[in-house]
Structure formats: C-alpha cells, structure tokens
C-alpha cells in the first residue's frame, strides 16, 4: 500500500466525540500515523506478518494502519471504553480484523501471546506527570522486536536516558521530527490549533538483540 493511500484511509476514521482531558485524548492525525507505520514497515519490516499492539489506542488509528500494512494480528489497548467503541466501529468500517482490550497500561499482562511490535502515541505527561514514562516502560517490557512512539521533542534527552538506563532498551533512535497539530478540543484551548514538535522514536529492547 502506498503512503498516500494509507493516509487517505486513516483520514476517514471517526475521532473522539467527547475527549477526556485527564487521559490527554488527542487524535493521532492521518499524516503522522501513516508515516509512523509506513516507516516501521518499509524501513525496518516491523509490521507485516507481525503481532502488533497499539498502546493507548484511542480511536484505533495506529492499530488500523498496522492491519492495512499487513500485520498478522493487532491488539488495541485502552483504558477508556468509549474510545474502544469508536475504534471497533472504525475497524468494522474498513473491514479489518483487530482485537480490543480495555486495560490500564500499567496493569497490562500478556499470557500466551508474543507481541513483536508496539506502536503508540502516549500521553505527553502534561496533565499527569510521568504518564509518558509509564507507557514507554510497559512497551519495552512487552515488545520482542521494537517500540515506535511519539514524544515531545523538548523531552528528547530525558526519553533517551530513561529508555537506555531504566527501561531495558538496547537502542533508542529518533527517526524524524514531526509537527503534531493539536486541535481546539478543550475549553482551556485559546487557539484553534497548536503545533507541537514531536519525535518519532524507535526503541529496541535488549532481548531483541
């Protein structure tokens, strides 16, 4: 599947109708999501025929992108039941197969299922300090091959240091810097849209070596 085709399909997905600020629910736009998964597959072969988990899947954008790029099995995980309902509808609309699990990431346990690749757009930790670190730590415990994640560029040094020193990553590489368009979703937003610089990371757990 070509990049533009993937971006077009993701652009038609339903998004949050009533986002929850305490969960930092922001949609992962089709531009970023398509490039994230396309890079994971075409540069590293981490999607096609792999078992992929979408952590904090929200409306399912990253997980659905993985299915469209030929993942063998995709699991979307989120603590919010309403988000999972939208994600399930999105998967049905595109006629792709995904499984969904309602669970807090920090309590996540997989039994009998090996996850090759984790993809995620975690909370940036602006409302709940350290939320991004909980996601990264959990992802590196679960993934057998690689973790792809978005984090604010301003946290780059902190993310790399924590991944390598504390979370058992053997490598932590920024693949590119992207602009994340944050729409005016909440009452405290004064502008119609805010652009945030984010890094697309690829982490490799030590056991994958």
Image (cartoon, grey):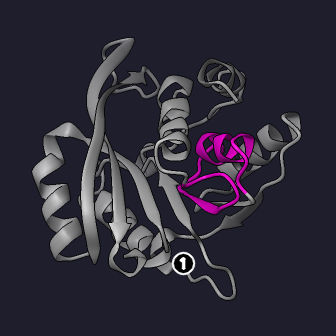
Number of other residues with Cα within 10 Å of mark 1, as a class: few under 14, some 14 to 19, many 20 or more: few
Picture mark count: 1
Span shown in magenta: 46-71
In which quadrant of the rendered view does residue 193 lie?
top left
Farthest-out residue, top: 192
Quarter of the image for the N terminus: give it: top right
Q: Nearer the viewer, residue 141 or 69?
A: 69
Q: Position of residue 83 (x, y in %)?
A: 66, 48
Question: Does the stretch in magenta take in 181?
Answer: no
Does residue 27 show up? no
Question: Does the stretch in magenta take in 69?
Answer: yes
Quarter of the image for the C terminus: give it: bottom left
Above-or-below relation of 40 to 118: above
Q: Position of residue 59 (x, y in %)?
A: 65, 42
In which quadrant of the rendered view does residue 94 lie?
top right
> In this figure, which residue is indicated by the disc labeled 1?
108
Q: Nearer the viewer, residue 14 or 192?
A: 14
Q: Image check: 156 left or right of 124?
A: left
Does residue 185 show up? yes
Identify the residue at image location x=59%, y=72%.
115
Above-or-below relation of 75 to 155: below
Above-or-below relation of 182 to 122: above
Identify the residue at image location x=64%, y=31%.
15
């Amino acid at each position: 599947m070509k990049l533009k085709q993937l971006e077009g399909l993701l652009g038609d997905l339903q998004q949050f109708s009533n986002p929850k600020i305490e969960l930092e629910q922001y949609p992962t736009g089709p531009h970023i999501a398509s490039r994230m998964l396309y890079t994971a597959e075409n540069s590293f072969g981490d999607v096609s025929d792999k078992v992929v988990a979408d952590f904090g899947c929200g409306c399912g954008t990253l997980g659905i992108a993985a299915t469209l790029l030929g993942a063998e099995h995709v699991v979307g995980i989120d603590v919010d039941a309403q988000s999972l309902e939208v994600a399930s509808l999105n998967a049905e609309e595109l006629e792709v197969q995904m499984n969904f699990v309602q669970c807090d990431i920090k309590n996540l346990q997989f039994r009998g299922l090996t996850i090759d690749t984790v993809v995620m757009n975690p909370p940036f930790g602006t409302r709940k300090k350290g939320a991004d670190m909980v996601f990264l730590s959990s992802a590196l415990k679960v993934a057998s091959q690689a973790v792809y994640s978005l984090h604010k560029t301003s946290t780059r040094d902190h993310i790399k240091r924590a991944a390598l020193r504390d979370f058992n990553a053997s490598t932590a590489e920024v693949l590119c810097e992207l602009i994340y368009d944050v729409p005016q979703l909440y009452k405290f937003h004064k502008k119609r849209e805010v652009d945030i610089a984010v890094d697309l990371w690829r982490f490799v757990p030590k056991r994958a070596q």
